[in-house]
Amino acid sequence: MLDDLRRDVHYGIRQLRSAPAFTLVATLTLALGVGANTAIFSVVNGLLLRPLPYAEPDRLLFVDGVLTRAEGEVRFQVAYPDIEAMRAQSKTLAAVTAWTTAWGLALEGTDGAQRLDANFVGADYFAILGATPLLGRTFADDDHAIGGAAPLVVMLSEATWRQEFGADQNIVGRSIRLQNRVFTVIGVMPASFTDVAAVQGSRVDVWVPIERAPELFGALNLSDRNSRLMWAVARLAPGASIAAANAELATLGAQIAAAFPATNTNFSLRGASLAGQYFADARQPLWFLLGGSIFVLLIGCANVANLLLVRAANRAREFAVRQAVGASTGRLVRQLLVESLLLAAVGSAAGLVMASWLTPVLVRMSDIQVPAFARVGIDGTVLGVTLLTSIACGLLFGLAPIWRAARTSVRETMGSARVAPASRVAHWVAGVEMTAAFLLAAAALLLLQSFAALTRTDLLFRTDRLLTVRLELPQDRYGTPAARARAGEALLERIRAVPGVEQAAIWGPGMFGRSTWIAFLSPADRVVADDERLMVWRHSTNPGALNDLEIAILNGRDFAATDTIDSPPVTILSEAAASRLWPGEDAVGKQLRAGAATSTPITVIGVAADARHRGRFRFSLGAAAYEPQLDIYFPYAQRPNGLIVFGARTAGDPDHHVAAVRAAVAAIDPTLPAYDIESLENRMRGEESPLAFAALLINLYGGVAVLLAAVGVYGVLAAAVAGRSRDIGIRAALGADRRRLLSQVLKEGVMIASIAVAIGGVAAWLLSRAFASLLFGVTGGNEGLIAATAVFLIALAALASVIPARRAANVDPIAVLRTD
């Protein structure tokens, strides 16, 4: 049996070598399909399927909050007391703790101020993750004590330890100055440790107990249930499921809401698999691209199946001779199966080579930040999947010629010198190719439409040449609102004085075009239920900033220098927010409350044009186009945030002014780190890159699919013409019109495409309806786009039919009939 198999392999290799053109075309077709599929799968495997680098990662949960309102659910961070309630009362969670990356720490003793990205973590944080330090220890219970008497301790990442402290082996126990305080280093985490903050795309240089945040920054009140600035990570108890944990969290959330209605009404807690939180923006496009690559692979298999059918038709006499001398049908089937698997192996090997080159290119193009644990590349899992894929491909495209060979009649084949025509199976395979290509091309065009709609969406404020920079005002030097207001004004004036800066604005606490801070508003003259308060995005800014951003004041006035901390509080509402609070009325002069019903009334002094401060599109936030949002603006002098953003509009390239802006900040406070400096246009491009990346690859897939489908139609018609050359010769001898012979073959190609397009058109229309809820700017009315795709594919099929049609029209009757 092994000898027979060895002979089949040797014979198969000879057959492939005897037809180099066929082997080359089939190998390249398979390499393209397998290479694209393997490259995308290697990215999906590395980012989405690989287990997290923690102990028992399947038992880890990411916990946040959900505020239920009339317009839907809003995901929130949680407050420290809620996390402590989970720690004390949960039975399904073996352990739970808090973490937040809201602040960084200024490292002193370096050249200029340097910010270290910090993760402020609760008790048992490292134990929950099963992480151990490279040097020293993790935090003890005493380190998490609430109050000023607790020690200031810090843990370093290995990168920080090496870069900032020269990999000092005696670093444990050493004192360093962070945020103008003396901290004791108690440990160093290894480079292999991936912090949970990577869920939010954050880098972490140091870890500090979360209980130290209030004394360092003052913005976090650990006893305030309204101070929702942290997430939680939890470990399921043995035998507990995520569903059971969520049921318990729902009960616990209801109990907390009943006990604290002023802060927790309609607020609940929710847990989800920690693994599912990684690469949230990349998940949808990656799965979408994997589906597209599978389509290309299937089209490639169909194309190779067609090539094998044509080749089987040409080898019909060979099969008949072998059967005549005693070969069984089973032996022929086995021989053809070996040849198909050999072809699949060669194509897959070439595809692996292509994937090994393509994978790092895809990662660079996607702008995905890959943590160390992901290790995107060709590994054992990817090789195993590729092996199974190649076997499946060999079996898939080998079925058609096997079926053809099994139906070979020795008598009919040996009694004729004619080439067997392409079977109806070949026509159906070509039709399937064309249908699949139609679907992929329609998806590609839908993505292009989506990306075009995205880039056309106006943010409704000016974004060009705006250099943005973040600052954090530490509690020890800027602990009062007055101190922060003075610092903001001084920094603004210094940045305005930088050569090449045309305008400057204070913003915050969130970034321009990426609002993340909210307020709940209600008219001051009436009491409304908590869930009826209007949720808006809040911004603190300076007089003239809205004008600089070209956000027009439609009614009332802008902020003035006299709107200070000592004057009555004032605000400006966006037009949409004003109309929601006072429908059909003039909002200017009216008063509102931001927060509790007992908060100080705030007078509306102006109504501004609507803007889209939340940006254009992010996959993780859904696909509907953002409507102009609800916004409230406060004068920074009255609501000075510790987290502050400056925007400097420059005369030229913003990147050329980075050093000057850093110097301007250092001139006011040399220990104040200026960080995250980038132009707003670059930020917007980074936000749009997942969709741009998906659109690019799907359009490449669509182009390849259409090309392969056209080659498939050409192959079928070429085989049909070769198989019917005798019939064509007879008709030509009897006087058949050359034009009619030409049109008959063209009609056959167009008929294949038309049937495929009719089937694919319905599927593409359904696809477009589904895409309406997934992609930006894609609505259900895409019939014109689908029709244009159909016309293009039919025209392409007609073009692919031209050469076989011309060959049929030019058949020489004498040469063909001489063989009979």
Image (cartoon, rainbow, N blue to C red):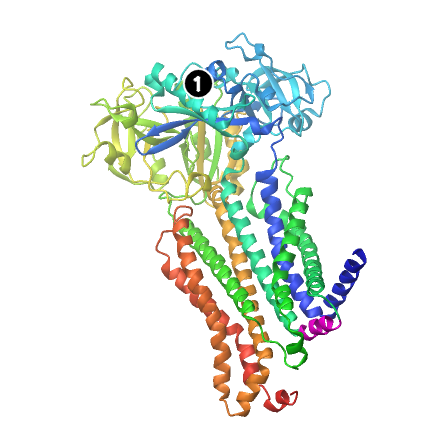
| Secondary structure of residue under mark 1 | helix
Does residue 785 lie above or below 511 as drawn? below
Please name the residue shown 40% across and 38% down the image: 614
Position of 197 compared to 523: left or right?
right
Position of 531 compared to 255: left or right?
left
Q: Is residue 810 visible?
A: no
Q: Quadrant of the N terminus?
A: bottom right
Where in the figure is residue 173, as x and y percent of width and height? Answer: 67, 14
Inspect the magenta stretch and tell me whether residue 122 lies in it: no
161 and 708: which is toward the camera: 708
Where in the figure is residue 698, as x and y percent of width and height? Answer: 52, 54
Q: Main secondary structure of the magenta part?
A: helix
Q: Is residue 146 visible?
A: yes
Residue ID for mark 1: 82
**Highlighted range, magenta:** 315-325
Where in the figure is residue 436, as x and y percent of width and height? Answer: 50, 59
Give the residue type at disc 1: Asp
Please name the residue shown 29% across and 21% down the image: 567
332 and 432: which is toward the camera: 332
542 and 230: which is toward the camera: 230
